[in-house]
Image: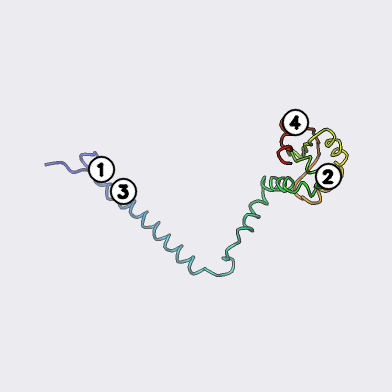
């Protein structure tokens, strides 16, 4: 005849019922709590403060905080660059980078870089007025970089 499992596994037979019961008791409490929350949610459905939020407003709230705000403003600037500098200049320049309050604009040629350099005060004012939340301390204009002129050749 085989010995009881508790003895074979060297377990304390007096503690086994408590351990088994405790595990089942915890599971029962979790299920009871889940049922209570489900009933509560059904009772509160449609009450003030429980209205669902539109996805756009939720995303605006999330995006308005932290690092996302400046990244979204920078994306807006890149996407609407032609509205800031005009379509003619936008064809020959682009926002290259933005770090530590320094906006870097890359121009197709040194001639366009010179033209943009003269426009820095106007650009700064326009950007600050239209893109509140994007803090620009300085604007730098650079000329063509390796591979940059090919980008415009493909775009034309």
The residues tagged by marks 1 and 2 sit, at their Cα atoms, a distance apart of: 80 Å
Q: Height in image: 148 above or below 60?
A: above
Marked residue nearer the N-terminal end (1 or 2): 1
Marked residue nearer the N-terminal end (3 or 4): 3
Tell me if mark 2 has few (under 14), some (14-19) or many (20+) residues whose alpha carbon lies within 10 angstroms of its own: some
Secondary structure under the numbered disc 3 in the rendered image: helix
| Along the line of sight, the residue nearer the viewer: 56 or 143 | 143
Q: Which quarter of the figure is the C terminus placed in?
A: top right
Tell me if mark 1 has few (under 14), some (14-19) or many (20+) residues whose alpha carbon lies within 10 angstroms of its own: few
Residue at image point 75% right, 31% down: 145
Residue that numbered label 1 is attached to: 12
Secondary structure under the numbered disc 2 in the rendered image: helix
Tell me if mark 4 has few (under 14), some (14-19) or many (20+) residues whose alpha carbon lies within 10 angstroms of its own: few
| Along the line of sight, the residue nearer the viewer: 35 or 122 | 122
Label of residue 27 in the image: none
The residues tagged by marks 4 and 1 sit, at their Cα atoms, a distance apart of: 77 Å
Marks 2/3 in contact by CB < 8 Å: the verdict is no
Secondary structure under the numbered disc 4 in the rendered image: loop
Marked residue nearer the N-terminal end (4 or 1): 1
Residue that numbered label 4 is attached to: 145
Marks 2/4 in contact by CB < 8 Å: the verdict is no
Asked if residue 128 shows in the view, the reply is yes
Q: Position of residue 121 (x, y in %)?
A: 87, 43
Residue that numbered label 2 is attached to: 123
Tell me if mark 3 has few (under 14), some (14-19) or many (20+) residues whose alpha carbon lies within 10 angstroms of its own: few
Secondary structure under the numbered disc 1 in the rendered image: loop
Which is closer to the viewer, label 1 or label 3? 3
């Amino acid at each position: 005849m085989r010995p009881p499992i508790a003895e074979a596994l060297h377990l304390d037979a007096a503690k086994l019922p408590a351990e088994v019961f405790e595990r089942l008791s915890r599971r029962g409490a979790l299920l009871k709590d889940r049922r209570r929350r489900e009933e509560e949610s059904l009772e509160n459905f449609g009450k003030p403060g429980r209205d669902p939020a539109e996805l756009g407003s939720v995303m605006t709230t999330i995006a308005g905080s932290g690092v996302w705000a400046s990244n979204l403003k920078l994306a807006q600037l890149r996407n609407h660059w032609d509205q800031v500098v005009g379509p003619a200049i936008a064809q020959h320049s682009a926002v290259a980078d933005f770090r530590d309050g320094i906006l870097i604009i890359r121009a197709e040629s040194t001639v366009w870089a010179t033209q943009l350099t003269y426009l820095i005060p106007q650009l700064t004012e326009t950007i600050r007025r239209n893109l509140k939340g994007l803090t620009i301390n300085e604007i730098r204009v650079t000329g063509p970089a390796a591979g940059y002129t090919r980008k415009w050749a493909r775009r034309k």
